[in-house]
Image (cartoon, rainbow, N blue to C red):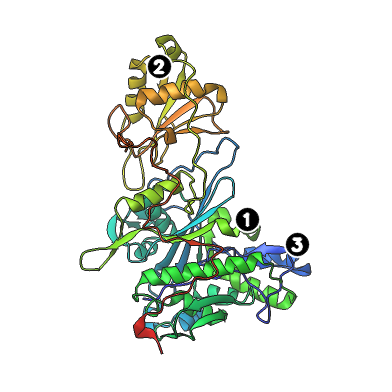
Amino acid sequence: MAAAGGGGASSASGGPRRPRKRRVLRWAALTVSVLILGTAGAGYLYIDGLNDNIRDDALHLGDNKLDGPKPNAAGQTPLNILLLGSDSRNSAENLRLGGSRPDQGRPPLADVQMLLHLSADRSSMSVLSIPRDTKVTIPTCTDPHDGTVYQERVNKINTSLQNGGPGCTVATWEELTGIPVDHFVMVDFAGVVSMADAVGGVPVCVDDNVHDPKSGLRLEAGETVIRGEQALQWLRTRHGFEDGSDLGRAKAQHMYMNAMVRQLKAGTKLSNPGQLRRLAEEATKALTVDEGLGSVGKLYDLATELRQVPTGRITMATIPWVYSPGGTYVLPKEGDAQEVFSMIRHDIALDGQDEKPSPEPTPTQEPTDTDAATIAVRVLNGTGTAAQTAVSGRASTIADSLREAGFTQAAAGTEPRSQWDTVLTYGDTADRDAVRAVADALGLPERAVQHSAGATGLTLVIGADWREGATYPATDTPAEDETTPPDDTQPPESLDGLNGKDTNACMTVNPSATW
């Protein structure tokens, strides 16, 4: 099965031209670079018409949407966007480009899936791919259009799109990673072709002559600037790269996206209003987004944020993985995959360039019974996720434990919450001693304590990582001969990341696909 690619920017097919001041986002499709529709003159007045082209759909089709992250101390909030490439063959153009006529009319698969994490301060961007054959639990999803309920099942992650639409793929990602997804953008075959010429072509590299009859890709060794349908062939090629699996294809997609980002940042320009309008029409018709992104203006605002990130702080990677016994599935690599998911949940860049956070200040004095009695803590139950129902009475259990420890003002709240990590937030720096006292009483690690500009008082949300017991589960501690704890800002060695500035990357050609 061939995967869909997604384009980057759009432009006149005769050359890369785009006036800067009037560019309108097309977005960052499969290529995760920013799909930015440049627009000029009368083209800007045409935006309202383009809005009607964009399809939107429900963001989350599961029973329990994870709550988004809280703002940091500066009031900044990270952003997580799921980028999907659909292999839909349900239009004449998609059928022509994708082939496989027997698949016409079947529900599409999400063969390309990438989570784009934009850091709270917009200083870095991490893009995490997952192989389409990854074995996952697809949670119960309800189709918002006809009410069909798809029961929970275990299958390859690309089939999640068939359970009501992209909102079920979002629910599956949240179940697998614990990362709350804010938006999704999905593009089909036709979208790639209509956008690929936007920056005058994208340079790619292969270390040998390659020919993949399945995708149609045929290139000579070295660097080639690819455009239009050839770009789609590159993004769909699986048999021609490395071991002929989806893993090599993901790496080729990362290289393409990085090159696209560099092209966009180099300042490509559009000059022909007629061609611009045609490409804008095609690009917007190729997109399906969540309801929160259902206009060109909102997509443009998103693109503006994405473009703030320096190229050298963009990282493309595939989740650490292993083959299942027999090779039928790909499985997240135990330990390493969870470590990567945790980094994203805690807004830590996958390039390893983030500074190690300073520890929370220690209390100025040991808490006394009187001190504890003056500290008000609101406790909320966030243990429910897409795959697990909330633990009944969990907030009351922890509030009771705090009161027994002398925090007599601890109280359980009834507001519903849903998040993977347990977090204790505070908004006033004067509360640091109080926060530390509460954290110590419950055994919370430093990473669970967050200073948030939007927080009022002390709020403890019990996450899905703490479903039982009155003390937070023990975490890894340094060995006796270690003087410092592990550096949580460094990704596991198994994460094969590609930096946005890497212009020397070249795909390894599968020996059986050379000519």
Label 3 crowd bin: few (<14), some (14–19), many (20+), radius 10 Å? few
Q: Does dot 3 land on a helix, a strand or a loop?
A: loop
- Relative to 342, say whether 47 is above or below: below
- Residue in the foreground of this view, choosing between 251 and 41: 251
Of callouts 2 and 1, which one flags the residue occurring earlier in the amino acid sequence? 1
Question: Which quadrant: the N terminus?
Answer: bottom left
Q: Is residue 89 visible?
A: no
Q: Are marks 3 and 2 in contact (CB under 8 Å)?
A: no
Under mark 2, the amino acid is Phe
The kind of secondary structure element at disc 2 is loop
Quadrant of the rendering where the C terminus is positioned? bottom left
User: Where in the figure is residue 70, as x and y percent of width and height?
Assistant: 51, 38
Q: As drawn, is 42 to the left or to the right of 428?
A: right
Task: Indicate the quadrant where residue 38 lies.
Answer: bottom right
Up-down: is 102 above or below 21?
Answer: below
Residue designated by label 1: 298
Task: Name the residue at the bottom extreme.
Answer: 515
Most extreme residue toward the front is 481
Residue 215 place in picture, x, y as percent? 43, 82
Residue pointed to by mark 2: 407
Q: Position of residue 309 (x, y in %)?
A: 60, 55
> Residue sitting at 58 percent across and 75 percent down?
202
Mark 2–mark 1 distance (CA, rounded to whole Å): 45 Å
Q: Residue at x 49, y 86 (%)?
A: 220
Mark before the other along the chain sequence, 3 or 2: 3
Residue type at tag 3: Lys
Residue closest to the eye, 8 or 55: 8
Q: Are marks 2 and 1 in contact (CB under 8 Å)?
A: no
509 relative to 44 in the view: left or right? left
